[in-house]
Structure formats: C-alpha cells, structure tokens
Image: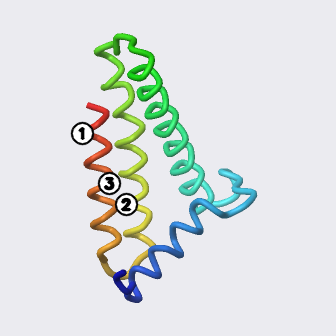
C-alpha cells in the first residue's frame, strides 16, 4: 500500500466535506452552492451509468443520443469537482491524477 502525503490527506478531507456534509442549503453560501452542484451532477452521472448498465444487460438497443446526453452531467461533475478541489487545495497530488484517470475512463465508457 502506498503512503498518503499531506496533500493527499488534504484532498481526502475536501472529498469528505463534499460528500459527507449534512444539511447543505444551496442558498446559504457560495460554498454550499458549489457542494450542492457537485452532488447534483454526481447523482445525475450515477443514474445515467446505472441506466446504461441496465440497458446493456437487458439486451436493449442503446439510442445514439444517449451517449451524448449521459456524457454531459459526467463532464460537469468531474469538471466542477476538480475545480473545487483545486480551489481548496494548495498542491496537486497522486490522488488528483487518479481522479483524473477515473474521469477519463468513465467518459470513454459512456461515449
């Protein structure tokens, strides 16, 4: 197992803040609005991925417009997530590169 450096721990704290903060009210502050937007795009992306998997397993024909429609919230999710992490973090890290890799793999799967 690899050892996390200070920046990796900082990014994990940011991710905990995004996904584990309770009672996020988008109109309460700018930070809450950013967290709310990231969560909304995450849930939309997750729903599109699950729907695609279900359609493939059921043997149905996947509409050609579905890939473009599904790729949009995924791109917005990873875009807003990385912008938020970069605005909150001081340095880049291995974890940011790993998250970037995951976003590329998911985008290729959806396209």
Q: Are marks 1 and 3 in contact (CB under 8 Å)?
A: no
Nearest to the observer: residue 65 or residue 53: 53
Q: Is residue 86 left or right of residue 111?
A: right
Residue 43: quarter of image:
top right
Q: Picture coordinates of residue 10 (x, y %)?
A: 46, 80
Element type where label 3 sits in the image? helix
The alpha-carbon separation of the residues under discs 1 and 2 comes to 18 Å
Q: Picture coordinates of residue 15 (x, y %)?
A: 51, 66
Q: Is residue 32 left or right of residue 50?
A: right
Nearest to the observer: residue 59 or residue 8: 59
Mark 3 or 2: in front is 3
Q: Are marks 3 and 2 in contact (CB under 8 Å)?
A: no
N-terminal of the pair, mark 1 or mark 2, is 2
Residue reaching furthest to the right? 23
Q: Residue at x 46, y 38 (%)?
A: 45
The alpha-carbon separation of the residues under discs 3 and 2 comes to 12 Å
Q: Which residue is mark 2?
A: 82
Screen quadrant of the C terminus: top left
Q: Is residue 31 above or below residue 43?
A: below
Q: Which mark is residue 108?
A: 1
Q: Residues within 10 Å of mark 3 (few under 14, many from 20)?
A: few
Q: Residues within 10 Å of mark 2 (few under 14, many from 20)?
A: some
**Count of number-bearing discs:** 3
Q: Picture coordinates of residue 3 (x, y %)?
A: 37, 86
N-terminal of the pair, mark 3 or mark 2, is 2
């Amino acid at each position: 197992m690899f050892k996390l450096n200070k920046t990796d721990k900082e990014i994990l704290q940011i991710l905990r803040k995004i996904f584990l903060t309770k009672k996020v009210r988008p109109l309460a502050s700018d930070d809450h609005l950013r967290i709310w937007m990231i969560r909304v795009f995450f849930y939309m992306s997750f729903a599109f991925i699950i729907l695609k998997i279900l359609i493939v397993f059921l043997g149905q024909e996947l509409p050609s417009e579905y890939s473009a429609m599904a790729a949009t919230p995924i791109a917005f999710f990873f875009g807003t997530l990385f912008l938020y992490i970069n605005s909150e973090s001081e340095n880049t890290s291995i974890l940011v590169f790993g998250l970037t890799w995951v976003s590329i793999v998911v985008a290729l799967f959806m396209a």
